[in-house]
Amino acid sequence: MSGTIHGIWTLVLMITVLGIFAWAWSSKREVAFKEAAMLAVDDSHHNPEKEQNND
């Protein structure tokens, strides 16, 4: 009985991980990924820390 419960729990967790993976890499998220990738090099966004250091 305990082995069956552990097997079902493992299967549920595997399906959850695969679902998150599929959601994260879906084509609907492509724009968000590209935007996040450019945040480090994009100077067009307002950056209050940068303005404080220039004073």
Image (cartoon, rainbow, N blue to C red):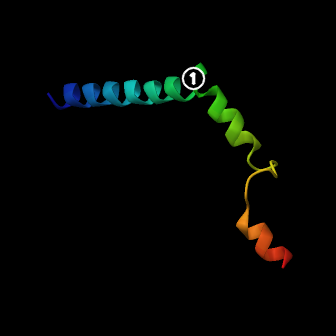
Q: Quadrant of residue 16?
A: top left
Specify whether 33 is left or right of 2.
right
Residue 13 appears in the rendering: yes
Which residue type does callout 1 highlight?
Lys
Say which residue appears at 82% left-offset and 52% top-offset. 43
Say which residue appears at 80% left-offset and 48% top-offset. 42
| Residue designated by label 1 | 28
Q: Position of residue 50 (x, y in %)?
A: 79, 67
In the image, residue 40 above or below residue 49:
above
Describe the element under mark 1 as helix, strand or loop: helix
Say which residue appears at 66% left-offset and 34% top-offset. 33
Q: Position of residue 47 (x, y in %)?
A: 73, 61
Instruction: Please name whichever residue, 2 or 36, is drawn nearer the observer in this view of the structure.
Output: 36
Instruction: Please name whichever residue, 25 or 40, is drawn nearer the observer in this view of the structure.
Output: 40
Say which residue appears at 44% left-offset and 25% top-offset. 19
Instruction: Please name whichever residue, 47 or 33, is drawn nearer the observer in this view of the structure.
Output: 47
Specify whether 22 is left or right of 6.
right
Q: Position of residue 36 (x, y in %)?
A: 68, 41
- Within-10-Å neighbours for mark 1: few <14, some 14–19, many 20+: few
